[in-house]
Image (cartoon, helix red, strand yellow):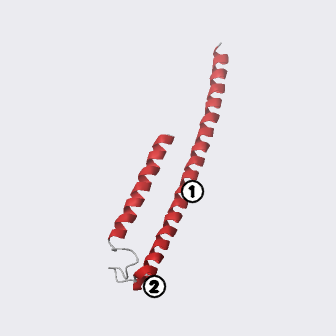
């Protein structure tokens, strides 16, 4: 798999996660405005609504945004490490193939 296709794959998955999170938020109404439609509240301050509820909702959104960003960075690092590993394997196999071809050439002469 090429680096370009992996970049596209990461971009697609990032867009999907973002769209999914935006869809789930749109069903709640404005975050921090009180208890949601699902019947559960986000805690006493958040369910009361007002400025503190909105602030808490914003902090929660920021926390999950940062968490998601960290996870994507770890995923990107892992994919890059895997790419490096496979490129090294390709280099080693190419060297072994060249040696085998040289032996075969010497044996046929």
Q: Which of the two residues, 1 or 15, is positioned nearer the viewer here?
A: 15
Q: Which residue is mark 2?
A: 45
**Label 1 belongs to which residue?**
74
Look at the picture and state if 44 lies above or below 28: below
Nearest the eye: 69 or 54: 54
Instruction: Name, please, the residue furthest toward the front.
Output: 51
Instruction: Say if residue 1 shows up in the picture.
Output: no
- Where is residue 69? Give x, y as percent: 52, 60
- Secondary element at image label 1: helix
Can residue 20 be seen here? The reply is yes
Indicate which disc residue 82 carries.
none
How far from the left and from the top, in percent, is residue 55? 47, 76
Q: For the residue labelled by badge 2, is the local secondary structure a helix, a strand or a loop? A: helix
Compared to residue 12, the image places residue 68 above or below, namely: below
**Which of the pair 106/21 is nearer the observer?**
21
The answer to which image quadrant residue 32 occupies is bottom left
Q: Is residue 70 above or below residue 12?
A: below
Q: Nearer the viewer, residue 88 or 68?
A: 68
Residue at image coords 49%, 64%: 65
When asked about the image quadrant of residue 29, the answer is bottom left
Q: Please state if 101 lies on the left or on the right of 6 as rendered.
A: right
Pointer 1 local density, CA inside 10 Å: few below 14, some 14–19, many at least 20: few
């Amino acid at each position: 798999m090429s680096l370009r296709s992996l970049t596209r794959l990461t971009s697609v998955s990032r867009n999907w996660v973002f769209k999914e999170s935006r869809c789930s938020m749109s069903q709640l109404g404005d975050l921090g405005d009180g208890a949601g439609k699902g019947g559960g509240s986000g805690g006493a301050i958040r369910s009361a609504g007002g400025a503190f509820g909105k602030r808490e909702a914003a902090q929660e959104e920021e926390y999950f945004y940062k968490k998601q960003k960290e996870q994507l960075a770890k995923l990107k690092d892992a994919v890059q490490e895997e790419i490096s590993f496979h490129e090294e394997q390709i280099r080693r196999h190419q060297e072994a193939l060249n040696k085998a071809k040289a032996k075969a050439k010497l044996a046929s002469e």
